[in-house]
Image: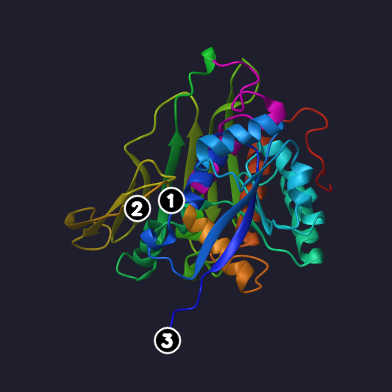
């Protein structure tokens, strides 16, 4: 008996920047190379600010495929009847209006992180997606990589005990003194700064190891404490740290940080337990190895055994999240079980609190939906 043909998800790509190019190239990779046979992907259209820009993108990143339509507006992508799902790769502060337009046009949405400017915008989008019976997911690609699945298994199988403290950092030197102030990392109108651009990655490991832990019973953080150092260039956050306590059921803490003026540590994530540690190597958005350390007895700190697990995959690894979207749409699911709406809301709620505590406000008009006070 012949195997069933894979479900093919037909995509429209919004914006033609770096992240969209990464996602597009991965969509075109042969699914069988990653062991995927049940779903596949096809790019129908690319939307940019001009037809020429969209066409150039297709030529450079989509194999010069003449069947892919080049549109000079995003609206044309949303209106294309052949497009089933839309990938949104615009800057953070445009996500809300882009995603809303896509949902109103009847398209399923995969939206880059941070999903919106604030949590109120995100909840408005989620309500619309539910009303329109459409799938919506934040593009948290790291959570769908095989390494994340294995870290979760080790973290929850019991031999390390319960998590106590997690340290996670994502930093990179963006050479901001030599960047134009309109650069996405510097422009507050684009949600610039370390928190929204880099912050989702420390958060994903805190969510996986603490929020998702069965002993946490899906309890939300009890407290969030944030601290921001702004750049005098534009006033966006340059170095930011925040601490999240999970104390309702767990007694655990995540100490997270992001900086755009220093390079990353070699070890980007350390999850500490009484019986050992999990050390995840940088880059934490696409790590290829992690080490588990086991102590001789609880609380000793004396490592008697280490196990290092390594991973490899072709391409960048964005196709794992695309496969998840395809499966959910195929099965009629409104959200992913692996990275559900609750987790995206958790991130945006934390970021709102950290920005407020650090005194980082967006310019007037950036936030299209304001939080209710």
Q: Residue at x 60, y 58 (%)?
A: 343
Left or right: where 83 falls relative to 285: right
- Residue 359 in view here: no
Per the model, the C-alpha gap separating discs 3 and 2 is 30 Å
Looking at the rendered structure, which numbered label has been put on residue 313? 2
Secondary structure category for the residue under label 3: loop
The percent position of residue 329, horizontal first and vertical second, equals 63, 67
Mark nearer the N terminus (3 vs 2): 3
- Circle 1 sits on which residue? 317
Cβ–Cβ below 8 Å for labels 1 and 2?
yes
Residue located farthest toward the front when viewing the structure as drawn: 66
Cβ–Cβ below 8 Å for labels 3 and 1?
no
Q: Is residue 186 magenta?
A: yes
- Circle 3 sits on which residue? 1
Q: Nearer the viewer, residue 81 or 311?
A: 81
The percent position of residue 85, horizontal first and vertical second, equals 67, 57
Secondary structure category for the residue under label 1: loop
Which region shows up in magenta? 179-203
Per the model, the C-alpha gap separating discs 1 and 2 is 7 Å
Left or right: where 258 falls relative to 372: left
């Amino acid at each position: 008996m012949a195997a069933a043909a894979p479900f093919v998800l037909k995509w429209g790509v919004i914006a033609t920047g770096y992240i969209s190019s990464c996602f597009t190239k991965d969509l075109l990779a042969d699914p069988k190379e990653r062991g995927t046979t049940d779903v596949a992907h096809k790019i129908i259209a690319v939307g940019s600010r001009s037809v020429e820009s969209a066409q150039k993108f297709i030529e450079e990143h989509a194999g010069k495929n003449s069947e892919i339509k080049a549109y000079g507006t995003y609206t044309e992508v949303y209106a294309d009847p052949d497009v089933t799902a839309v990938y949104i790769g615009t800057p953070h502060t445009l996500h809300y209006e882009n995603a809303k337009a896509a949902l109103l046009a009847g398209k399923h949405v995969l939206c880059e992180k941070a999903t919106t400017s604030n949590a109120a915008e995100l909840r408005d989008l989620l309500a619309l997606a539910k009303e329109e019976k459409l799938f919506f997911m934040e593009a948290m690609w790291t959570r769908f990589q095989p390494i994340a699945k294995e870290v979760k298994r080790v973290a929850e199988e019991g031999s390390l005990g319960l998590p106590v403290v997690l340290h996670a950092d994502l930093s990179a030197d963006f050479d901001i003194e030599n960047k134009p102030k309109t650069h996405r990392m510097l422009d507050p109108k684009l949600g610039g700064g370390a928190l929204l651009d880099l912050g989702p990655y420390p958060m994903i490991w805190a969510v996986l190891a603490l929020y998702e832990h069965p002993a946490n019973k899906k309890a939300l953080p009890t407290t969030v404490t944030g601290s921001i150092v702004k750049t005098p260039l534009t006033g966006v956050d340059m170095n930011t740290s925040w601490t999240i306590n999970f104390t309702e059921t767990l007694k655990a803490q995540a100490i997270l940080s992001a900086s755009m003026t220093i390079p990353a540590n070699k070890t980007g994530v350390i999850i500490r337990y009484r019986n050992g540690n999990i050390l995840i190597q940088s880059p934490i958005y696409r790590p290829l190895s992690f080490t588990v350390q086991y102590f001789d007895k609880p609380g000793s700190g004396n490592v008697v055994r280490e196990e290092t697990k390594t991973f490899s995959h072709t391409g960048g690894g964005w196709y794992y999240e695309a496969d998840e979207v395809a499966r959910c749409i195929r099965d009629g699911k409104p959200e992913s079980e692996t990275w559900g709406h609750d987790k995206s809301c958790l991130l945006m709620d934390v970021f709102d609190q950290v920005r407020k505590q650090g005194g980082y406000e967006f310019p007037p008009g950036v936030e299209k939906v304001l939080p209710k006070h």
